[in-house]
Amino acid sequence: MKGKIISSIEKIMPHAEPLLEERNASMLSNERYNFQLAFLHDGQRRMLMYNRVKVRGALAQYITLREVRLVPVTSLPDSMDDYYLSHELGVFPDLLCPFDNAGVVLNKGLWHAVWVTVYAKDGLPAGKYTTEFILETETGEVLQTLTHELEVINAKLPETDLRLTNWMHYDCIAQSHNVKPFSKKFYALFNEYLKWYVEGGFNMLLTPIFTPPLDTKEGTERLTTQLVEVEKKAQGEYVFHFSKLKTFVRFAQKRGIKYFEFSPLFTQWGGFFCPKIMATVNGKRQRIFGWETPSNDPEYARFLQAFLKEFGKVIRDMKMENICYFHLTDEPNLKTIDSYENCRKMVKEYVGNIPVMDALSDPEFKERGLVDVPAVGIRAYDKFKDGDTSKFFVYNCCTACEGYYSNRFINMPSQRTRILGFQLYKSNVLGYLHWGFNFYNTAYSVEPINPYVTADARRTLPAGDAFVVYPAKDGAYGSLRYEIVKEGFQDYDALRLLEQLVGREKIVEMLDENGVDGYTEYPRNGEWHIKFRQMINGQIKASLIK
């Protein structure tokens, strides 16, 4: 039996001995700190099961253990650079879930990982802690004992100043758990997804005023997830009811959501059509707008005028004017800029000072005053970086697959995912957006998928692009990538804490000296990353002692 303690930044592959050993480390007191236990059974028996890991030490009450399970990667990005774990299809570590009755199962000749999370919401007492991890059989025979030393520094990560959003897909919650959207059972599940969402660092939530017209094949529709109830009277007058929306917003705020972005008012990729909008007409609920309605339809303009006037009052009554954003469409390009301009004209008069925010990659939208807060694809960051970066978001998705851009594909090294935190700090942006927190559909939402066997929207997206949590019986399970994204956000917040002590100029200089530049240049090395972060912790500790 072999055993090692391995940094969280190394993905432990079954056939390769892990190298980034971690015998000691440091963390800030309210940080979510992760590492791994790696075991290799190389005895005579084919398999050892019903094993368990016991934890001994003062940190035991703050430690959670989860199994690291392999998931299939059955498609690859269209193009890849050389910073991937593999350019071949295969299985990779990703799913993190509680151990079942079989316990720790060890197959002969394969490395297995146990994910260790140390966390206390209100912060851990400062000090140095030694923790023992004892792998034993069901009869109590000790197979391996591993020791880890962790110093908790007497400092807390500050609340982030970033706006962080990862689009929640409400139809996918309803479909995966077979519940009606926004029913009592739905909210019980939504509560669990929100726990994961907020704990993962996200503080801004996509809010489906109407069913989001995202990732939907033209002429088809996704399951209705519409929070604003609409009545169309016989005289053509529209009446709106906002009680469901208010319930949703208050529910989210109580659980840590600070900002809200409203689902697009026009279809994706240019805004040529209307979103699906359901209304009660003559006592029956029916679709009154959708793919059949061009976005410049006069009746839709009349509808928007009536809706936005009423919605504006609700936003003011709920004191949301400074914490929300409107979306018009998603990922428009120069070929669709005229359509986008028409959409902006239709709503400009009625949204007041609430900013319009959309994901795009060409600065002309901003230069022409069509979008207030661009969410810039990181591949287009250089086109925008000479402007006021503090007034835009950045995002990545399936297209950022080569050129060393940070992303979260399953077959990428974790450091490539985590480097985003340092990059967000240096670029000094307002926020970060990703489109897929829990997208469990095929591309264009033709039908639902099982994310446990299909991580690539049925071979149409790079595996891991569409979700970072998995549906579980009463909520969700996390993933290795979820934890690494969170660690990247913590890196960002640690730099902000150090900034309070030494100034931003000094930290930018440190990042420059280490080769962190834009969204493509950085040391592509997990060991460097861990050492750099530990050095930051050391500087924080030293500054506090002074």
Image (spheres, grey):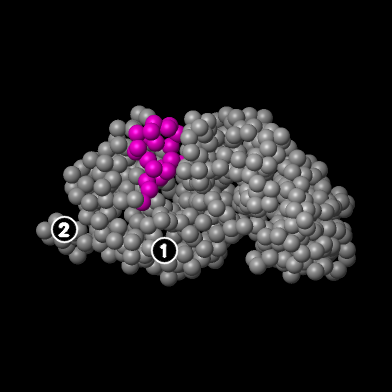
Rendering coords of residue 370 (x, y %): 34, 38
- For label 2, the residue is 237
Indicate whether residue 364 is drawn in magenta: yes
Tell whether 475 sits left or right of 144.
left
Rendering coords of residue 415 (x, y %): 68, 42
Instruction: Give the extent of the magenta segment.
Output: 354-375
View extreme (left): residue? 235
Residue occupying the point 75% across, 67% down: 125
Q: Tag 2, which secondary structure?
A: loop
Q: Which quadrant would residue 342 be assigned to in this image?
A: top left
Residue occupying the point 75% across, 40% down: 528
Tell whether 310 sits left or right of 35.
left
**Marking on residue 538:** none
- Contact, CB < 8 Å: mark 1 with mark 2? no
Tell me the amino acid under the disc marked 2: Glu
Image height of 205 relative to 297, above or below: below
Q: 10 Å neighbourhood of mark 2: few (<14), some, or many (≥20)?
A: few
Rendering coords of residue 240 (x, y %): 25, 62
Q: Would you say residue 528 is visible in this rendering?
A: yes
Rendering coords of residue 15 (x, y %): 77, 42
Quarter of the figure that contains the C terminus? bottom right
Image height of 196 relative to 330, above or below: below
- For label 1, the residue is 249
Q: Tag 1, which secondary structure?
A: helix
Q: Which quadrant would residue 286 be assigned to in this image?
A: bottom left
